[in-house]
Image (cartoon, helix red, strand yellow):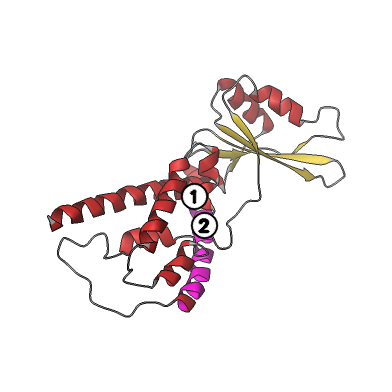
Amino acid sequence: MRRGWWIAGVAVRIVLLLILLFGALVVALSVSPTPRTLSDFRSSLTAGRVSVVSYRVTPGERGGEILDLRWSEGPLIWHRGDRAPISGTPDGYTLERLMADAGPSWARVVQEEERGFGWWYARWPFGVPAQLGLWWVGAAWVVTFLIMVGSTPRLGNRWAWFWMFGAGQVGALAFLLLEPRPLWYRYGRRPPPRSRVEGGLGCLLSVVTATAAVAAAVAVGNLLNAVLP
């Protein structure tokens, strides 16, 4: 009976981990989009390849406003367009033209919010995946957080994991890999006892892991976008 519960627990951890890893991959690719021209964007819209269009309106260097565009062609293909002027030129690419171009397609057009990561909570499971309708990535993070709160972690107390889940960004992934025993341990094998990390040290570690997570996301995104179409 215990072995059956162990197998079920490992299966749940693997499913949650795969969902979160997929969400992290989507975020990494979305923060490092490959450059494309405005003509490429409009051609992709016409061909029906665009899933989501994300735009920001920013001030131009010589006055007027600039339309910054990012778009996805499926969750793993992200591009950014030329910074298109929307005022000050007779052929400016306005929001009205963007909406008109996107109208015949199935693309979802959203105004881009501030990019990056939140301070306490890990915003990445609820950001770009939500634009693509991947709500289950955020749900997997919430389920993992609730499992942590309801358990007695081995490596750190709940406060340490609280900081790692939030400010540390990668706490949910680390928890699923390591708690209550490493995921790669066979049934019956137990790790040696050790003292647990307290909340204060967990807070400091979360700053380190957050910095590493951002750097890794940019590096992985640039690498994969270099080889993806």
Q: Which mark is residue 122?
A: 2
Q: Is residue 2 above or below residue 46?
A: below
Q: Residue at x 57, y 57 (%)?
A: 117
| Figure quadrant of residue 33 | top right
Quadrant in which the N terminus is drawn: bottom left
Task: Indicate the secondary structure of the residue bearing disc 1.
Answer: helix
**Pointer 2 and pointer 1: residues touching (CB < 8 Å)?**
yes
Q: Is residue 156 above or below residue 49?
A: below
Residue 220 highlighted magenta (yes or no): yes
Q: Is residue 171 above or below residue 101?
A: below
Q: Residue furthest left?
A: 1
Q: Which mark is residue 72?
A: none
Residue located beneath label 1 in the image:
125
Q: Residue furthest top?
A: 104
Residue 212: x and y, percent?
50, 64
Q: Residue at x 65, y 26 (%)?
A: 42
Q: Residue at x 63, y 51 (%)?
A: 115
Q: Callout 1, which amino acid?
A: Pro
Q: Which region of the structure is painted magenta?
A: 201-221
Q: Residue furthest bottom?
A: 195
Q: CA distance from mark 2 to mark 1?
A: 7 Å
Report if residue 83 is visible in the image.
no
